[in-house]
Image (cartoon, coloured by chain):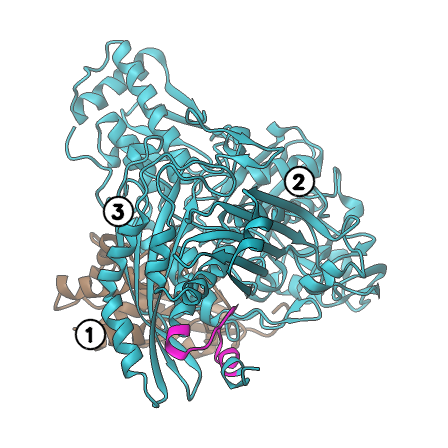
């Protein structure tokens, strides 16, 4: 074997297609006879459908029209609770809820017709906030408006709070955030009763769609085919919602007998599809005069929107991360996901953890101040160590050294000197500078027993040409799946990653290796790629086609000869939990994640007291993520996640009006441009995780957790204010600082 | 726009003559993608905010979603498909590959064209100039750092850029 592939910045596998414009996204293909599908949606947040009127000026015979009555199978999106209809037929529970589908061969005609359908709805009172939902004045879901509740208990919080001399309280809020992948959602479907249903599109999770379509059409699994096209970003936003678009496009195709393409415009994508759950977290913390945490009492509530969708799982991750990387003898976390009449909130990078970590890391600065300690010193006294136990009862067995990560981040950012200098120099001028930090962790893979239930499968095969193909349902959505899988397989086999092809996810060909979510692709699926590749190698060696020590050329020849002799060469691997991992679903206790990535982030800001604008001047991100498979790709993941975190903290403000997003355009929903971001400086510590491929852990979601609290802590340092709700737009900061403290 | 009057329009796209019938106010983006079958030009927002539809028209970087087809009549256009040479990639494309400037790839065609447009005007830009020149092209994946690095790498590789 030559130089190992893992650890070097191999070029992106599909990079050439992307920089030349040859990469095909779903809107780039148009089969003959294709129709264009559009969706007619609810104009109100809640009510009963009384009738549907069609403008007689439109030649409706030229159009294909689908309502709930056309659905051959079950009109419920298969996910967790199966409460969300594909098409509402009786009541609507949120604005933009799909009611009717229209298709036409002319894209503009289809779009025009959408506006010529009137839905008559008798409105009901709507629930629009977390408080409305908890008050239960209107019950819109179940018996109490609660999709899910969790309670985590460690020690005796009540006694500890009762005995404490210092108790610090705080309340923190986060708003919705749009994923804003630059390629809007889209699907192409072909469907008929004889052949079944096939869809091509933009997605993260081909098998979620596969399962959903089988139930929607009442068809056996082998009659459903789902193919991922090149996908222009996901960030969670293409985890669950694409099942609905695939279903809609397929229903139109089923009825019309023609291929149907359904591509969302930006406005529709922003108004109708999922966003990050808004949240509210309250903290009550008991702390000793020695600066040690004695008790943490945390109440974490997220707004799930109108249907359950993934809210229980988002809540779970947020609840488990709510007490952070700290060792505290008494912890109680109460988590609740509530129903409101807004479009369902869904998966978004971090999946509940950024919300609860934002609250925690803001609060830790306040607790530090209450005991007269610097933010870094207070954290150092409370960091979790190997052998300590998290709130859910997980004992950390791996080496963890949060203090070392923090020290490195402080040194790289010049934290201590700046902390003093800014405090000294912030005089009476309009510009105030501040520096703040956040320390946190993020669990990789599905929570608890999730990976065992998923039971992911990967296939690696040798070809007649002597090359290798990796077959998984893990999607390339920009994060580098194709490239790292090729690197992992190549190193397992002693070949070059140019010799490895990663198959396009197509459920007709690839096994179900689970969804592309939860920072699981590298660590969990990558590990399966490694074992399946080793399976191929063993087969070749055992059959005498390959010497144990071999060159790339020998591998190629051996593989060719084997395939010639036996027709095929395939090895399969299936997930098995690492030994010793235990999780109790009933008690909600145990090893919540196989492992965690650990991090310390530092943000430096300038606040302009004339414009109330906050700008981030420097950002240092230090993290321990196990072995880094591809440094450039990994760095790009961290930089991009930090950028989204900066957007969430300062710019991205979803404005709700009567249950709908009032600023659903890129013109007035502001994400960071190249002018808005500081230099984002990324550093890795690598402590190999024994159960990841070559020691790698998860990485994708981690960077979303730390930017917002570090920035808020820096703003607090700069201004002396206590901003506790994001986004911290200039208007918010002005309100906060111009309101006299009571 | 169904049943609307059409005009016959001509332009030169990537060195080839493209003749098409379109409403004068049809979007250049649609003309390129549908009539020209040049799907490398992407639609991200349809309102000139994201820059995914950027093309170079008569030497200027424009959002093709906001450009009326009639405006391109008689014009010279470079799309992402016209950037690479017969044998090899443009130095900017090479640099994007080398430095991780492309992730999901949807902003990449516009971003590469914006970078080429910048380097044709300012051969050795500062980071501030790069930031300003790319500010009309939004990227949600990279946080832009790898893109800045790509543009700087392109300068380093070729002081005399082969410009389209």
Judging by the rendered image, the residue that carries numbered circle 1 is: B125
Which lettered chain is shown in brown? B
The part of the chain drawn in magenta is A716-734
The secondary element bearing badge 2 is classed as loop
Q: Which chain's residue wears label 1?
A: B
Label 3 crowd bin: few (<14), some (14–19), many (20+), radius 10 Å: some
* Tag 1 near tag 3, CB within 8 Å: no
Is A718 included in the stretch rendered in magenta?
yes
The secondary element bearing badge 3 is classed as strand
List x then y, in percent, for residue A577: 45, 27
Q: Using the rendered view, name the quadrant where residue A415 is placed.
A: bottom left
Which one is nearer the viewer's eye here, A292 or A302?
A: A292
List x then y, in percent, for residue A333: 57, 49
Q: Specify whether disc 1 shares its chain with disc 2.
A: no
Distance Cα–Cα, label 1 vs label 3: 33 Å
Distance Cα–Cα, label 1 vs label 2: 52 Å
Is A190 included in the stretch rendered in magenta?
no
Label 1 crowd bin: few (<14), some (14–19), many (20+), radius 10 Å: some
Circle on res. A685: 3
The secondary element bearing badge 1 is classed as loop
List x then y, in percent, for residue A533: 33, 25
């Amino acid at each position: 074997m030559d130089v190992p592939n893992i650890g070097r910045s191999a070029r992106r596998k599909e990079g050439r297609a992307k920089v030349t414009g040859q990469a095909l996204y779903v809107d780039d293909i148009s089969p003959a006879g294709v129709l264009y599908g559009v969706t007619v949606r609810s104009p109100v947040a809640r009510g009963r459908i009384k009738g549907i009127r069609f403008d007689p000026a439109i030649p409706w015979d030229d159009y294909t029209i689908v309502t709930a009555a056309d659905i051959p199978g079950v009109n419920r999106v298969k996910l967790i609770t199966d409460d969300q209809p594909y098409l509402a037929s009786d009541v609507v529970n949120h604005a933009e809820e799909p009611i009717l589908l229209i298709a036409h061969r002319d894209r503009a005609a289809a779009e025009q017709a959408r506006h010529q359908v009137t839905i008559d709805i008798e409105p009901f009172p709507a629930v629009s906030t977390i408080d409305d939902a908890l008050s239960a004045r209107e019950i819109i879901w179940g018996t109490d408006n609660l999709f899910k509740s969790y309670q985590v208990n460690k020690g005796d919080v009540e006694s500890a709070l009762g005995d404490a001399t210092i108790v610090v309280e705080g309340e923190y809020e986060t708003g919705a955030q749009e994923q804003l992948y630059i390629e809007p959602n889209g699907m192409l479907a072909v469907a008929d009763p004889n052949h079944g249903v096939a869809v091509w599109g933009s997605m993260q999770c081909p098998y979620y769609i596969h399962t959903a379509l089988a139930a929607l059409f009442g068809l056996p699994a082998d009659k459903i085919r789902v193919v991922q096209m090149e996908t222009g970003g996901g960030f969670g936003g293409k985890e669950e919602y694409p099942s609905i678009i695939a279903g809609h496009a397929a229903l139109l195709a089923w009825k019309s007998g023609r291929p149907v393409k359904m591509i969302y415009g930006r406005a529709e994508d922003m108004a109708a599809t999922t966003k990050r759950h808004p949240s509210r977290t309250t903290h009550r913390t008991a702390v000793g005069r020695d600066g040690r945490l004695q008790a943490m009492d945390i109440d974490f509530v997220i707004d799930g929107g109108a249907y359950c969708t993934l809210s229980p799982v988002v809540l779970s991750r947020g609840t488990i991360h709510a007490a952070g990387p700290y060792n505290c003898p008494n912890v109680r976390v109460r988590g609740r996901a509530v129903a409101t009449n807004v479009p369902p909130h869904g998966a978004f990078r971090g999946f509940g953890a950024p919300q609860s970590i934002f609250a925690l890391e803001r609060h830790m600065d306040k607790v530090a101040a209450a005991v007269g300690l610097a933010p870094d010193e207070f954290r150092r006294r409370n960091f979790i160590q190997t052998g300590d136990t998290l709130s859910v009862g997980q004992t950390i067995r791996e080496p963890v050294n949060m203090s070392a990560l923090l020290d490195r981040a402080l040194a790289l950012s010049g934290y201590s000197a700046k902390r003093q200098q800014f405090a000294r120099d912030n005089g009476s001028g309009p510009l105030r500078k501040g520096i703040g930090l956040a320390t946190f962790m993020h669990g990789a893979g599905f929570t608890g027993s999730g990976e065992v239930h998923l039971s992911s499968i990967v296939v690696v095969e040798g070809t007649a040409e002597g090359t290798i193909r990796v077959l998984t349902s893990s999607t390339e959505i920009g994060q580098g799946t194709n490239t790292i899988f090729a690197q992992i397989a190549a190193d397992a086999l002693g070949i070059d990653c140019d010799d490895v092809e990663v198959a396009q996810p197509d459920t007709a060909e690839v096994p179900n290796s689970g969804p592309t979510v939860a920072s699981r692709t590298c660590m969990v699926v990558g590990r399966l790629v490694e074992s399946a590749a080793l399976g191929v190698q063993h087969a070749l060696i055992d059959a005498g086609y390959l010497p144990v020590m071999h060159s790339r050329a020998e591998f190629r020849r051996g593989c060719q000869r084997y395939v010639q002799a036996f027709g095929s060469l395939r090895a399969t691997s299936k997930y098995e939990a690492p030994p010793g991992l235990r999780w109790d679903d009933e008690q909600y206790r145990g090893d919540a994640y196989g492992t965690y990535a650990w991090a310390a982030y530092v943000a430096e800001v300038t606040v302009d007291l004339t414009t109330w604008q906050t700008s981030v001047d420097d950002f240092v991100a230090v993290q321990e993520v196990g072995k880094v498979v591809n440094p450039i790709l990994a760095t790009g993941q961290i930089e991009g996640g930090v950028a989204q975190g900066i957007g969430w903290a300062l710019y991205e403000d979803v404005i709700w009006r009567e249950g709908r997003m009032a600023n659903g355009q890129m013109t007035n929903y502001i994400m960071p441009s190249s002018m808005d971001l500081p230099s984002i400086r990324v550093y890795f510590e690598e402590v190999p995780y024994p159960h990841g491929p070559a020691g790698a852990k998860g990485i994708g979601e981690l960077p979303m957790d730390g930017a917002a609290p570090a920035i808020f802590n820096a703003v607090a340092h700069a201004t002396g204010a206590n901003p506790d709700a994001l986004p911290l737009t200039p208007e918010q900061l002005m309100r906060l600082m111009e309101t006299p403290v009571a | 726009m169904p049943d609307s009057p059409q005009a016959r329009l001509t332009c030169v796209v990537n060195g080839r003559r493209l003749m098409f019938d379109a409403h004068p106010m049809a979007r250049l983006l649609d003309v390129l993608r549908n009539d020209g079958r040049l799907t490398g030009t992407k639609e991200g927002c349809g309102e000139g905010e994201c820059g995914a539809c950027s093309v170079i028209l008569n030497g200027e970087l424009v959002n093709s979603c906001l450009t009326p087809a009639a405006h391109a009549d008689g014009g010279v256009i470079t799309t992402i498909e016209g950037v690479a040479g017969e044998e090899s990639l443009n130095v900017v494309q090479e640099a994007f590959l080398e430095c991780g400037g492309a992730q999901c790839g949807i902003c990449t065609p516009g971003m590469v064209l914006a970078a080429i447009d910048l380097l044709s005007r300012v051969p050795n830009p500062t980071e501030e100039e790069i930031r300003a020149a790319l500010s009309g092209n939004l990227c949600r994946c990279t946080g832009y750092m790898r893109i800045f690095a790509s543009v700087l790498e392109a300068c380093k590789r070729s002081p005399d850029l082969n410009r389209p």
